[in-house]
Image (spheres, grey):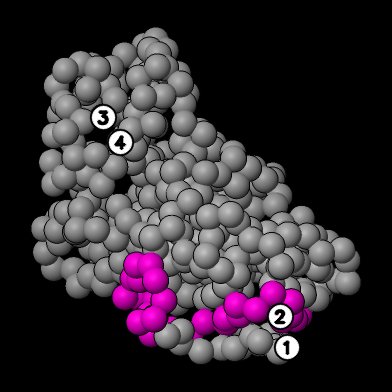
Amino acid sequence: MWFSRFAIACLLTVHPLCAEAEEQNAQLRGSVANSRIQFEKTGKGHVAFIGGSITEMNGYRPMVCEFLQKRFPDTEFAFTAAGISSTCSTTGAFRLSSDVLSAGPVDLFFIEFAVNDDQDAGHARRECIRGLEGIIRQCRRHNPNMDIVVTYFVNPGMRDLLEQGKVPVSIEAHATVARHYSIPTIHLAREVAERITADTLTWKVFGGTHPAPAGNRICADMIEEMLSTAWSDPLPAGAKPAAHPLPLPDRPVDAGNYGDGRFIDPAKADLGADWKLHVPDWKNLPGGKRGRFTTVPLLCATQPGAVATLTFSGRAIGAYLLAGPDAGAVEVSIDDGPFHRHDLFHRFSRGLHYPRTVIFDADLKSGEHTLRVRISETKNAASKGHAARILQFVAN
């Protein structure tokens, strides 16, 4: 059983590994009845997964899909796999509409970003909250009946903190959002730390940040046990889906959350000299490339001083981009204000054209704005160039 003695102890006392909350490692909040009603009564279901490489890999996701197909053998499922390696909850909030919600109403949705918010984005608490809360609020607006489960995977640094009785920033922030919206959570990170402390699991057997099959199996078992327990009683004949309520009064955890997050096609920008919307000549660009990006037109410039202009509506603006070994810096002006510099280079850019979202400003007044992006004369000392390669502008 995945409920270890430590998890049971959380219900009685605050064990150091349970300091963030007196909750079980598989915490059912609210209800997950709507998806079951949909699956059983209509014979159809849409299940989606969003996250980073842990979701993209052949791991817990296909295991959960297999469980659902066995649990509901007469249901025709559509599965949406929206994991993209390296991406964090900020990027998730902006790509949610195009990558998940565009496929139609989702009945059961799994979200995984704790590790990437920690190790890839290095987010502070505010950014962890704004990303995840933005995803939750978009989901509730798109389909109020959608059942949602948030998972917390783990890397070595997060594991060490948990074993010291501390809580990783991304997990604490995501837990705050989950509690606020009564979202079930799977605290795989704490489960793993507890098992290692109890000498019933090793980090090697678990498999590391990108878990081995045995590690992914632990997560899938936790999800399966939670859902099976919630769905154990016979479904009443007259059962009908019910909208998940928003907190009353409806006050977000962070009013600046990305609940209106969306992409803006870079083709809408007014391009000055030296900017071009095209597929880069990847063969002649040093650094690793991921296939999903190599056939996509990008808004590109490599010449310092090149300026592009975009009009947009909202309170936040930024860019979802690929930052490779030659990633430079951009200077950004909004509504003819002063230019502010943003370094596009990432510590993982040295050998990879790395997908990341750079927010230029997240606290504007709501309304229409004009963005000017200029390639900077200066660059990160580790970079080999001044390139900007933008997949999408992002706005909220």
Quadrant containing the C terminus in the rendered view: bottom right
Q: Is residue 269 above or below residue 72?
A: below
Label placed on residue 381: none
Disc 4 target residue: 188
Residue under the image location 28 percent in, 29 percent down? 191
In-image side of 314 versus 91 (left or right): right
Q: Between 285 and 201, which is closer to the camera in this rendering?
A: 285
Give the Cα distance between marks 4 and 1. 49 Å
Crowding at label 2, few (<14), some or many (≥20) Cα neighbours within 10 Å?
some
In the rendered image, residue 148, in percent from the top left (x then y), is placed at 40, 52
Crowding at label 1, few (<14), some or many (≥20) Cα neighbours within 10 Å?
few
Q: Amino acid at mark 3?
A: Val
Label placed on residue 306: 2
Disc 3 target residue: 192
Please report the bounds of the magenta region as a residue range: 282-311
In the rendered image, residue 257, in percent from the top left (x then y), is placed at 64, 53
Give the Cα distance between marks 1 and 3. 52 Å
- Total marks placed: 4
Tell me whether the residue at label 3 lies in contact with that at label 4, contact meaning CB atoms closer than 8 angstroms.
Answer: yes
- Residue 230, located in which quarter of the rendered image? top left
In the rendered image, residue 206, in percent from the top left (x then y), is placed at 18, 36
Q: Secondary structure at mark 4?
A: helix
